[in-house]
Amino acid sequence: MLTAMRRLAGTWFAKALFLLLILSFGIWGIEDVVRKFGTDNAVARVNDEAIELPEAQLATRREIARIQRQVGSSFEITPQMSQQVARRAVENLIMDRVQRQEAERLGVVAPDQAVQNYVWSIPAFQGTDGRFSRLLLDQFLRNNGLSEPEFLALLRADLQRQQLVGAVRAGAAGPDALTKPLLMWQGERRVAEVATLPLSDAPEPAAPDEAQLRRFHENNPERFSAPEYRRVTVATLSPATVAAEVQPSEQDLRATFEAHRAQFETPERRTLEQAVMQSREAAEKIAADWRGGASFADIEREAQAGGGQALTLGTLDRSSVPVPELADAAFALGADGVSDPVQTPFGWHVLKVTGIEPGHARSFEEVREQVADDLRREKAADLAYERANEVEDALAGGATLEEVGQRFGLPVEKVTIDARGQTQDGKPADLHLDASGRDVALRAIFAAEPGQAPRLAEAGQVGLFAFDLQEVIPAALKPFEQVEDQVRAAWMQDARRRSQEERAAALLGAVKGGKSLQDAAREAGLTARRVGPFSREPDQQGANSPPPELLAPLFATAPNEATMAETADGFAVGQVVDIVRVNPDADPLGLGRVRSEVEQAMLGDLEAQYLEALRRNAKVTINPTMMGQVSAR
């Protein structure tokens, strides 16, 4: 047998079989490489230029951070919202690539000097003296998670984009055929006769009987229904709920003080003035003149004449000076000292120290209470985190919220509340949460289904909550006997409204029948007053104007015709008696203003169409599989 196998191993068939096995094992060993061969890991491509996953994720995080800064950090970004933000962020990256590639194709560039001037001209980076502030720039970079090179690259791309679309926008001009009619439309004013019929002037309706009130009650359930209520048990956990258990020792207090000693020390601060020039030679000349006794005003004029600028930095400690080289130079000088030129990406800096505030260190006894408060908060937060794990384990083990609350000392409330957190007697329920946490908890409670097991969830920044939903009490029409007084008052008000509406309609019919509003109103025992001239803009009205609800109908009505509208307190009927038109040729300033508005709108449309054409002509592909990972959190 062995001899036969050795003979078989020497055949070409056996050798081919062994080679096949070796290849199979080799392929299995590099399975990932083989499987992914030919696949694209980019989120999107623009003319074969890739937008990789880390870049798309970073852009999405920045966009989410921007949204939360606008609406508040407690605003909850849902997965669906995150996906929408991710798509928007990727589309912005695509458009950035499209415009940059077009700029490169056309040879559009943004020189370093233009980028610097652009930075210095941004109002957000200008201090109270109206000059560029490096401190404001650094704060902006920190808040937006940008490095200086990244930010300058963004500005350079923006300058290129401005040049790219500038030629397109420059072609817009507002034609007289559009601007003159628009000015006439905007400037048109009208005079009208107006009669008002407030509900308070309506005749007192006859008292309704019970049958009428019951029908009104049944036909208007939205007015007399109780909202949906939910009966829940709510337990809360936060540092405040466990703070009483934290009693730091003397040793802990002193150790904390030593660990944070710098926090209780006021560092040395220096009042600085600075000149920034574009060449070392110009900076050395500034330094020499400053040491020679030149005033700051002289240095400011000299810097501006040399293409630079001089400004006061204020009083700063070492950590507040954004560039380490500048901080080293500033804090190595004595009082009234002037530094040698120091180079940064923004040019050559010369610093002068005009004042020095010595540092001061507070003793442990001076800050003992502050240290104790800080340590209690820190340990309470740690304890709350540990307690949260224990509470989750207990809930997972089948413990009820009452048992968990009793075991771990948590506040537990049994309440019946509506979606606003009000109890059935109209009072706010105490859920032991701050305002933002309370809103989060209420949304969760009214999104839950009965029978769900209670689990801890975050409520705002520092709180946790768990709830057990026992019952959903649907919205229901309140019994007539319970709301009879409310029904009666609503019926009377509704009767007054119908009465005044009928009177207003009769007044309108009389005017349409050929009478003037003055005559028709007088015959109906009402008074009509003349108002105007008034414009069509509600925020431009004075005392001699119609009710705001009647403005649009009056401007949609022909001369001598009438119209009516329901107002906040009743009804109003109006008749147009005169139209005051504008001569656009007699108002050059107004015509120029409207032409500017028209041109700005046209410029925006032209730019949008141009960018859409660039996007359409570019070869853009989006990888749906990778796109799903952009918003993954």
Image: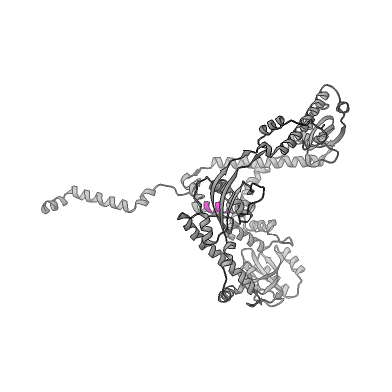
Is the image coloured rainbow, by chain, by secondary structure, or in one colour?
Answer: one colour
Give the overall secondary structure of the magenta segment.
Answer: helix
Task: Determine if the magenta segment contains residue 383.
Answer: no
Picture coordinates of residue 263, whole percent (x, y):
62, 72
For residue 60, above or below residue 192 = below
Is residue 20 or residue 585 the one in the foreground? 20
Q: Which residues are magenta?
A: 56-63
Picture coordinates of residue 152, whole percent (x, y):
60, 57
- Hey, which quadrant is residue 266 in on the image? bottom right
Picture coordinates of residue 469, whole percent (x, y):
54, 48
> Can residue 171 be seen at all in this image of the molecule?
no
> Can residue 448 be seen at all in this image of the molecule?
yes
Picture coordinates of residue 435, whole percent (x, y):
64, 54
**Left or right side of 249 for 339:** right
Is residue 165 or residue 238 the one in the foreground? 238
For residue 547, above or below residue 245 = above
Is residue 440 or residue 224 the one in the foreground? 224
**Left or right side of 422 for 297:** right
Tally of numbered discs: 0
Give the farthest residue toward the top. Answer: 513
- Hey, which quadrant is residue 117 in on the image? bottom right
Is residue 583 or residue 69 the one in the foreground? 69
